[in-house]
Image: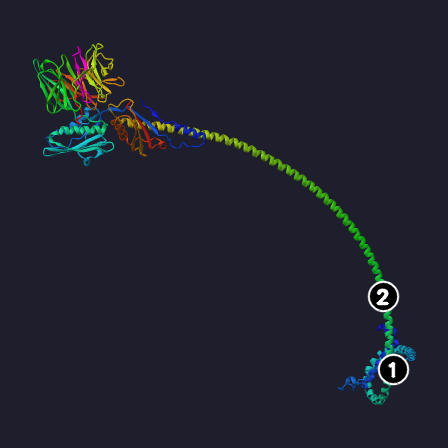
Amino acid sequence: MTVLAFLQCSHRLAATALMAGMLMFAMPAQAALEIDISGGTETGVPLAVVPFDQPGGIDDLARIIGDDLARSGLFAPIGREAMPARPSAPDQLRIDDWRAGKARYLVMGDVQRQGGKMRVRFYLIDVSSGARLAGSQITASADADRSVAHSISDIVYEELTGERGAFSTRLAYVTERGSGDDRTYTLQIADSDGANPRTVLESPYPIMSPNWSPDGGRLAYVSFEGNRSAIWVQDLSTGERFQLTDFPGINGAPAWSPRGDKIAVTLSKGGNPDIYIIDLDTRRSQRLTRDGGIDTEPTWYPDNRTVAFTSDRNGQPQVFRQAGPDDRARRLTFDTSYAAGPRISPDGERLAMVIRDDRGFFVAQQTLTDGSRQLLSRGGGEERPSYAPNGAMVVYAAQSGSGSVLKISPAIGGEPQTLSYDRGKVRDPVWGPFND
Amino acid sequence: MLAMMARMPLAVTLAVLLHLILVLVMLFNNPWKDDKPQVSGEAENRPTPSIEAESVSSEAIERQAQRLKQERESREREKTEAERAAEKAAAARRAEEARAEQIQALREEREKAAESEQKRLEALREARAEAEATREQAQKEAEAARREAQEAAERREAEEAAAEKARREAEERARQAAAEKARQEAEEKARREAEEKARKEAEEQARKAAEEKARREAAEQARKEAEEKARQAAAEKARREAEVQAAREAREQALHEQLAAEQRQQAEQDALQKWAAAIQSKVRQNWQRPRGAKVGWTCTVTVRQDQDGRVRDVTVGSCDGDRLFERSVVQAIEAASPLPKPEIDAIFQEELRFNFKPE
């Protein structure tokens, strides 16, 4: 575990000096002392998001930022009661007050409202060195307070991790309310923290498997309007939509390719469910899989060509991948009797899916390079994981009492965060792309 | 004089008588009275006493000698008579002195009588004086001859005596010289012998001394050589012992130093271990390793600290973790500042290297 490594040349030097009859031992060993540090405390990085100096009528920006960062699992915002002071600008900051505390970073700022707009200034401070790592001023409409907060979260996240933050992205999901014959299904879009949900489609028919176009401007989904499944594509800004497929049998699980030029779907027009690739320009479909089992839930690799999917061709649902119609399907999941609902991470290195063990269904993540796998959820009733565009978080649906909720787990593992709850059942969440 | 009187009583008597007459004459008649006051031309006027000896003939001399012989005989008689008369005169003088006044008176009477007589006497006296002078001259000459003869005889005697004396002296000298020579020779011989003996003795002495000296010197030399040899041997021995001692001490010193060095090195190694462990502990306590750090990630950082352990500079070398991981590493070190100090200042190193690994 812990090894003290000294370069041996100091010893040899001494021995040589001895042989030469010289006394050189008063000299310090010239070899640099090397110290290995391992272990340490694995923790979210303690960080203080000091309540902003802000007027009333605006959401608590510091709270939003802190929650964002906490959701990533990388940061552990300290409680406000643990803060020695409430500075909002560098000239108010006495860094020595903070050095004694846990927080290694400090975020502070203020908000000035100017009519219907607001100007937000914020600073990111490295408590250890006292250095200002980031700081900027954002001007926005007064009602965009949460967006401003998420933007600040993204900046802080990217400054500290080097990775792009995904807090200013959106989620899409389906809700189901009612029971019996009186059921209402909605297609919802919300902020990455579940706030600001809005309905883009409401239907008495089931809505399933929404999927974002890579530019974030459209959603493809399955609707059972008319009691038969069809794949629809809806423009989010205009609300216009069209039916992509309505083949006999199953039309399900649309998945936009990374470049946005294709959509993989599950069709049973050939007899049993197989994966097909639909070219959006020509609307022509190409059959990807051709076997006797059920092949469904396609997900794209970053190469825009390879697709992973669930197949029970071996008897039990497992995850396979296949690059093109002529490619042979290769199994990705082992050591589990059930692996379904796969999602390839944006970087193509990981696979999120639902596996079942004797305790239930869990969201798991498998590293594709070595096949290692870890559970990301805790409950046992989770389904449909989806990666944030930066791959740092996974959103999924989890049973909660009689209903279900959305939860987000850090992709590195860690405590899941439950998003704001809308009554009823929440299903099929999918994380939208960056708002470029 | 006495001897002359004894030998020539006549002459002496005559002389005395003559003198007496002269005295009488002078008493009553001052014949040289007139000469005295004359002041002019004393030499011219003074009558030159003429000595006519050279003109005296041998006949005259014969006659004179005859006469002188007669006179001498008469004088001898007169002398005898004078002697007797002198004896009578001596007795009579006392009576005479008593009748001096009578005489005086008489004398004056006689002087008058004598006046006439004077003249006649004068002449006579002159004649007589001349005779007397001649006689005296002869007498003187005789006397001189006699004296000469006598002196010659005396001289001869003296010469003979001198010769004798010289001869004796010469003999004596010769004798003395011979004796002296003999003595000298003897002395010389003795001296030479003595010298020879002394020389021989000296030589012998010198030889012995030389031998003694040589012997002593040889002994001294031998002693010195022996001493030198002993000294050298001792020195050599001491040197070798010193070398051995020095070598042993050097060896012991080297061992001591080696031991001390090893102990010091060991102590420094131990201190280094403890120091490294203390730093490691403190940094690890301050390392809040971000979640999601993957096995295999490694961050190597170089840290410069001051003597008080305060971190001055953190330089991230290679780091294959993400940025948050890298930041956590830097923060761990900064949060651990000041770093623990070593127990031994000598092992302090300004620069440290850390390898951060998640596992």
Instruction: List x then y, in percent, for residue A293.
Output: 20, 10
In the image as oriented, which residue stretches furthest toward the front? A282
Nearest the viewer among A277 and B11 is: A277
For the residue carrying disc 1, how many other residues have a C-alpha within 10 Å: few (<14), some (14-19), or many (20+)?
few
Examine the rendering and report whether any part of residue B17 can be seen.
yes
Q: Position of residue A72 (x, y in %)?
A: 20, 24
Of badges 1 and 2, the one in the foreground is: 2
Of labels 1 and 2, earlier in sequence is 1
Q: Amino acid at mark 1?
A: Ala
Q: Are marks 1 and 2 in contact (CB under 8 Å)?
A: no
Circle 1 marks a residue in which chain? B
Mark 1 lies on a secondary structure that is helix
Amino acid type indicated by mark 2:
Glu
Residue B101 visible, this orientation: no
Q: Which residue is mark 2?
A: B159
Question: Viewer-proximal residue, A112 or B166?
Answer: A112
Image quadrant occupied by the C terminus of chain A: top left
* Residue B258 left/right relative to B30: left
Are dots 1 and 2 on a single chain?
Answer: yes
Quadrant where the image shows the N terminus of chain A: top left
Residue B356 position, x and y percent, is 29, 26
Report the front residue among A197 and B124. A197
Image-quadrant location for residue A362: top left
Residue A91 falls in image quadrant: top left
Q: Which residue is mark 1?
A: B131
> How many numbered marks appear?
2
Mark 1–mark 2 distance (CA, rounded to whole Å): 38 Å
Q: Which residues are magenta?
A: A254-278
| SS label for mark 2 | helix
Q: Indicate yes or no whether the magenta region holds residue A25.
A: no
Relative to B27, say whether A399 is above or below.
above
